[in-house]
Image: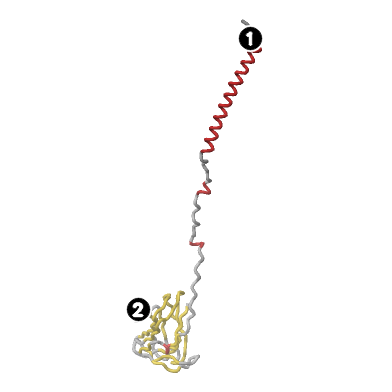
Amino acid sequence: MDQPSPTVYRTRSWTNRNRAVAGLAALGLLLIGYLIGRWQDTPASVTTPAALTSVAPAPSVSPSSESPSPAPVPVKYGLLQAEAANELAGIQAQDTEDEGGGQNVGWINRADHLRFDNFEFGEVPATKAKFRVASGAGVSGRVQIRLDTLENAPVGQVSVSNTGGWQTWRTDTAVLTPVTGTHTVYITFAADDDSEFMNVNWIQFDH
């Protein structure tokens, strides 16, 4: 029996190896194709940066960043003419010789009073009151400011002494406990006896 030549043997072995390699390659390609298909069917997970997913906090507003409220405007107080009070208790008006003319009130003794309704002091406190006074009496007394009722303690007062005559005028100033808002203003009078001791022309509050 003739033996196949070495060349024929090698050729057949080479062919068989090539066929095995080709089969393995085909199998590998099928496997790769399967894996690629599976990968394409799987939903891709989207990674969103934390900076995009986080909700930015609302900006905090500190009190200092708010617009400041406008400062209250002081009331410019006019003269309260004594004879124009809503009530003159125990007091009478007369023509005055003071500058500006008009009238003043007189025949004032203790327990008399003037009343001014709904006087607006405003938001900026009044801290003093000026009184235009005259006196020809030999005694001194006090003029006082009370708010809302006659029974309330005075928020300010000033002593009045002889000015040199009943029509010799002087401006005296009382220091007040700071007053704001709207009040009924009582001007009351105090003295050691029942003698008439002063005249009043006007009152003016100030800051």
Q: Relative to 54, does residue 116 appear above or below in the rendering?
A: below
Q: Identify the residue at the far top of this view.
A: 1
Q: Amino acid at mark 1?
A: Pro
Q: Position of residue 151 (x, y in %)?
A: 33, 80
Q: Identify the residue at the far bottom of this view.
A: 95
Q: Position of residue 145 (x, y in %)?
A: 39, 81
Q: Residue at x 42, y 88 (%)?
A: 84
Query: Badge 1: few (under 14), some or many (20 or more) residues near its Cα, within 10 Å?
Result: few
Q: Amino acid at mark 2?
A: Asn
Q: Identify the residue at the far right of this view.
A: 7
Asked if the residues shown at circle 2 and circle 1 are in contact, with their CB atoms under 8 angstroms apart, the answer is no
**Image quadrant assignment for residue 150:** bottom left
Q: Which residue is mark 2?
A: 152
The N terminus lies in which quarter of the figure? top right
Which one is nearer the viewer's eye here, 90 or 157? 90
**Image quadrant assignment for residue 173:** bottom left
Q: Which mark is residue 4?
A: 1
* Comes first in the chain, label 2 or label 1: 1
